[in-house]
Image (cartoon, rainbow, N blue to C red):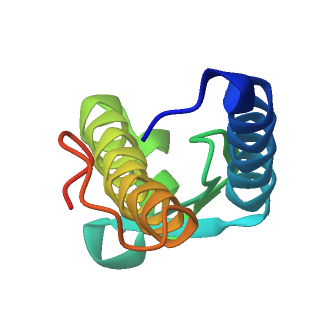
Amino acid sequence: MFNPLKMGEMLSKANEAQEEIKRRLGETVVEGESGGGAVRVTMNGKKELMKLRLDPAAVVGLAGEKPDVEMLEDLIVAAVNAAARKADDAIQSNIKGMLGGLNIPGLGG
């Protein structure tokens, strides 16, 4: 049975859980790549881009008369999206872990 007198305690615990999830996601690091590793990105669980690495071979083609900048841009976008998908998985995993396996609609449980 719901006890309204415990509402403050429940909110406090929910806030603590939210802060713990934020902390864990900030510490979570994922990588994404594209072009067979020509472009690699590192992102944290908060989907903040931390590092972008380009293989020199991916940049050499940009020095010519007609550089293929669009291809490199596409590879960067693909690598960032790959890392973002991994960050989404980390977010879901952290939330599920914090909720102790509760089946809450909308959280993939």
Q: Quadrant of residue 13?
A: top right
Left or right of residue 85: residue 64:
right
Whether residue 108 sits left or right of residue 27 in the image: it is left
x, y (%) of residue 103? 24, 59
Tally of numbered tags? 0
Instruction: Please report the residue visible at 48 percent of the width from the left and 55 percent of the height from the top.
Output: 91
Q: Is residue 55 visible?
A: no
> Residue 57: image x %, image y %?
47, 68
Q: Quadrant of the C terminus?
A: bottom left
Q: Quadrant of the N terminus?
A: top left
In the image, 106 versus 62, the foreground residue is: 106
Residue 32, compared with residue 8, is above or below; it is below
Q: Is residue 56 visible?
A: yes
* Residue found 40% across the figure and 41% down from its top: 64
Q: Is residue 16 left or right of residue 84?
A: right
Q: Who's the residue at 56% across and 41% down the image?
A: 47
Q: Position of residue 89 (x, y in %)?
A: 36, 63
Q: Position of residue 35 (x, y in %)?
A: 28, 67
